[in-house]
Amino acid sequence: MNSLSKREKTLIYILVCMIVFIGGIFLLVLPSFEQYSKAKSAYDEASDQLVITKASVPDYTTLDANVKKVKKELEEIRKSFYEEMNKEDLDQEITQLVVEHNLVPVNLSMSEIASEEVMNYEAYLKSQTKEQGTSSKENKTETTKKTTAKVYNVTMVVQGTVQDVQSLVNDANKTYSMKIGSVQYSEQQEDTKQMTITFKVYMM
């Protein structure tokens, strides 16, 4: 076998060095590339999780605005009710209301202030719509949430026309704080009657 020339030996040496160099690069690069791939995958997963988390977390700016809006509405409703007052103040309030409707107050009596449970609107609707054809076994006792309000029952005898009393009833029933429970008429003159009006006054 012919021995290799010096030139060939040099070429083989260079080739071996290149193979070793390239192999070394692969040995260094491949683990780094694998680590990069894992890191990139973890980053993408974390980014997706962040998007999902942001979507599920409430927008506290909007939530705060909604709370303020509801609070304002609550304050407006609260203003529609009488504040808790004593008998003398309520006497003046009812008398003034009656006089403003061209009625003459004759006599006024008032119960002591009491706490009364007021059924909420949803519970009221449920009580008005009863299911038909249900057996007693199917009926379940349902606990309804109720609100407690301070209530005065006021009875006032007035003189005036039916039209003025009707106007008083309409105006009183438009408010949150006062309702007319009943009106009883007793004949006196042709155009003037004496009437007994029962008010229910709610206070907060």
Image (spheres, grey):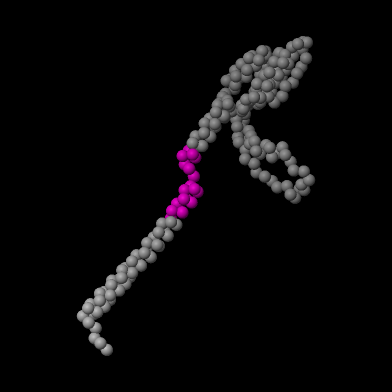
Quarter of the image with the C terminus in it: top right
Q: Position of residue 146 (x, y in %)?
A: 62, 38
Name the residue rendered at 39%, 60% in the picture: 39
Residue 197 left/right relative to 59: right
Quarter of the image with the N terminus in it: bottom left
Residue 144 left/right relative to 53: right
Q: Quadrant of residue 16?
A: bottom left
Q: Position of residue 100 (x, y in %)?
A: 63, 14
Q: Position of residue 46 (x, y in %)?
A: 43, 55
Name the residue rendered at 49%, 45% in the picture: 58
Q: Does residue 154 show up?
A: no
Q: Position of residue 183 (x, y in %)?
A: 72, 22
- Which of 200/177 is in front? 177
Compared to 127, does 51 lie above or below? below
Instruction: Determine the main secondary structure of the stretch shown in magenta.
Output: helix
Q: Does residue 129 show up?
A: yes
Q: Quadrant of residue 117?
A: top right
Extreme residue toward the bottom, this view: 1
- Which of 108/159 is in front? 159
Q: Is residue 148 magenta?
A: no
Name the residue rendered at 72%, 14% in the picture: 161
Count of marks, rendered view: 0
Q: What is the span of residues highlighted in magenta in the rendered image? A: 46-64
Compared to 126, does 172 lie above or below? above
Name the residue rendered at 52%, 31% in the picture: 72
- Which of 127/91 is in front? 127
